[in-house]
Image: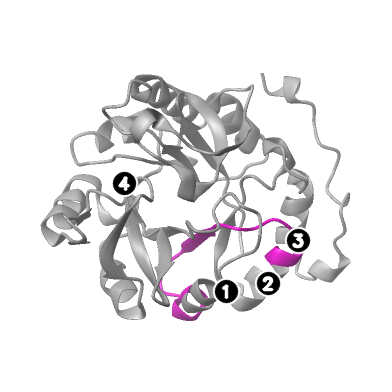
Amino acid sequence: MEFRPCIDIHNGKVKQIVGGSLRDEGDRAKENFVAKQDAAFYARLYRRYQISGGHVILLNAKDSPYYAETKRQALSALRASPGTLQAGGGMTPENAPEFLQAGASHVIVTSYVFRDGVLNYKNLERLCAVIGRDRLVLDLSCRKRDGAYYIVTDRWQKFTNEKITEALLDCLSGYAGEFLIHAADVEGKSSGIERGLVEMLGGWNRIPVTYAGGVGSFEHLRQLREWGQDRLNVTIGSALDIFGGTMRFEDVLAFLSSENTDDVKPGDGCAYPQYDLFL
């Protein structure tokens, strides 16, 4: 299980939000944390620790008055640490090459592929033709309804008719090199992970999968490792101290790199460097 960092950008600022609160109307969201530092700062921080595979997400729609600044922040992060971060948020075959050229290792896509509530194979094939399977990450972020996990689009606001099942994962793995899956109902709440979703994903195990949503403690990380059979990578946002939370960033890295996590205790990570080292 590897740590996959995040840089979520909303209204031109790096933020941690409650995922289910995001609304395009009025560019609103319930905020857990608004950073004083810009997106490039966090990209340099992750590069300093040689962490790759994380994602930069643009959380504004393209018609938002904030989109231009959000995009500028995203591109600056990609340029600050080229080849180490994935880019997502409103990606299409038309704009994806710009983000790849700016330094994105992969492009993350949801809404373009899931149109009008269903999987659009024509769009998916067009993306693969432009980007290539190995550089395409499908974001299958989901919310629970009627006992099943349904993929949601448009910044987690719209339900599709597509359930996350092993059959769907098998199918989509032929088009993408990785999956990114936010459990949107618990995203930003640090209240615990979605066990049913984690067990399904851990039992599938075909291509790399990054799980995000609800991690708020080291006990949650132990559960994720157990329930996901140590096969899932993890993103932690609001709970990290670098985003105003209580989980020390370096302790998380120490925990995830240890085979015997019972021996890892808060404070075992090396001294957290001062921010000005990265400015």
* Mark closer to the chain start, 4 or 1: 4
Give the colouring mode of the picture: one colour
Instruction: Give me the residue at 60% from left, 65% from top.
Output: 193
Q: Residues within 10 Å of mark 1 (few under 14, many from 20)?
A: few
Please, what secondary structure does the residue beneath circle 1 have?
helix
- Kind of residue at disc 3: Phe
Give the position of the N terminus as an image quadrant.
bottom right
Foreground mark, 3 or 4?
A: 4
At 41% across and 42% down in the image, what residue appears?
A: 105
Q: What kind of residue is marked 4? A: Asp
Q: What residue is pinned by disc 4? A: 154
The magenta region covers 201-221
First in residue order: circle 3 vs circle 4: 4
Membership of 74 in magenta stretch: no
Which circle's residue, 3 or 2, is located before the other in the chain?
3
C-alpha gap between disc 1 and disc 3: 15 Å
Q: Which residue is mark 2?
A: 223
Element type at marker 4?
loop
Q: Quadrant of residue 78?
A: top left
Q: Earlier in the sequence, mark 1 or mark 2?
A: 1
Q: Is residue 163 left or right of residue 129?
A: right
Query: In this figure, which residue is indicated by the disc labeled 1?
Result: 195
**Residue 218, disc:** 3
What crowding class fits label 3: few (fewer than 14 Cα within 10 Å), some (14-19), or many (20 or more)? some
- Residue 203 part of the magenta-drawn span: yes
Query: Which callout, 2 or 4, points at the residue further toward the start of the chain?
Result: 4
Few, some or many C-alpha atoms within 10 Å of disc 2 (few <14, some 14-19, many ≥20)?
some
Question: Spatial distance from mark 3 to mark 4, Cα to Cα?
Answer: 31 Å
**Picture coordinates of residue 72, whole percent (x, y):** 40, 21
